[in-house]
Image (cartoon, helix red, strand yellow):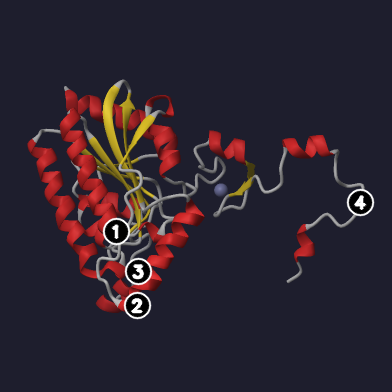
Amino acid sequence: MSSNWFKRVKEGITTSTKEKKETPEGLWHKCDKCKTVYTLQEIQKLYWVCDRCSHHGRIGSEEYFQILFDDGKYKELDAKLTSGDPLDFEDTKKYTDRVKATIKSTGLYDAIRTAAGKLDGHDFVIACMDFDFIGGSLGSVMGEKIARAIDHAIKINAPFMIISKSGGARMMEAGFSLMQMAKVSGKLGQLSEAKLPYISLLTHPTTGGVTASFAMLGDLNIAEPEALIGFAGPRVVKETIGRDLPDGFQTSEFVLEHGFLDYIVHRGELRDKVALSLKLFRS
Ligand SMILES: [Zn+2]
């Protein structure tokens, strides 16, 4: 395919250089669902939610931290913890190469970032996954970072939140990945003993080992609208049970209706609703 399609071929259409600098090309966002086009500034103001069809665009940890922490200020915890090569297989060289390449391309060090800040004037600790980093996969670094973030929450007597967005366990770390489910669940038990609330926010998509463990263990389990939430994908479930699946199977709305969620929250109301929930826990 010719890349000329995307270039201005004809002279004279281009506006002056000065004006061009103010609106650089490529700074557009197109809604995945209804294809409405926004400028980056517009969609940022809307929290990356399309105001025409309400589709929640995918965002990363930085955007969630900006939404939730007072004035967008926070201190990142264990920022540079990265994945080693726990299995030491000869062919894991490919895996370590992939980790290195992903660090370079995303500017992230693993599929989760943890941070402490204030929400509504109160201490708050958040662990938020980044799908751009190997599908938000749960590996040993994610488990360790969540565990340390929970220790930090207990130390400063703060509530804790995990924002999930994950394809599940990181297969390249095999058993080490699966162990993290138990490790995090155990740590959450300590948080509970310290009488500190844990809020789990499930965003699109939350699947596999993450759903099967800590994402569903919140004192409050909440989700963004129309998120895919499930253990196995719909195709696998259909083949396993040999039956057609009901409409909307594995969406937030379906999961809410079946009693596994406390509420669904529009991203524009996320901050206020979480602040209110924490206020209720405090009283
Ligand atoms: Zn839309």
**Could you classify mark 4 by the number of other residues whose Cα lies within 10 Å: few (under 14), some (14-19), or many (20 or more)?**
few
Lower position in the chain sequence, tag 3 or tag 2: 2
Q: Compute the Cα span from label 1 to label 3.
A: 21 Å
Lower position in the chain sequence, tag 1 or tag 4: 4
Asked if the residues shown at circle 3 and circle 4 are in contact, with their CB atoms under 8 angstroms apart, the answer is: no
Q: Compute the Cα span from label 3 to label 2.
A: 31 Å
Tell me the kind of residue under disc 3: Pro
Q: Could you say whether the residue bearing mark 4 is in a helix, strand or loop?
A: loop
Asked if the residues shown at circle 3 and circle 2 are in contact, with their CB atoms under 8 angstroms apart, the answer is: no
**Could you classify mark 1 by the number of other residues whose Cα lies within 10 Å: few (under 14), some (14-19), or many (20 or more)?**
many
Task: Give residue 169's mark.
Answer: none
Q: Quadrant of residue 6?
A: bottom right
Residue bearing mark 1: 138
Q: Compute the Cα span from label 1 to label 4.
A: 51 Å
The residue positioned farthest toward the right in the image shown: 12
The residue drawn where x is 28% and y is 60% is 139
Lower position in the chain sequence, tag 3 or tag 4: 4
Residue bearing mark 2: 91
Tell me the kind of residue under disc 2: Asp
- Circle 4 or circle 2, nearest the eye: 2
Residue bearing mark 3: 234
Q: Is residue 139 above or below residue 190?
A: below
Tell me the kind of residue under disc 1: Leu
Residue bearing mark 4: 11
Q: Is residue 117 above or below residue 266?
A: above
Q: Compute the Cα span from label 1 to label 2.
A: 20 Å
Asked if the residues shown at circle 1 and circle 3 are in contact, with their CB atoms under 8 angstroms apart, the answer is: no
Q: Is residue 260 visible?
A: no
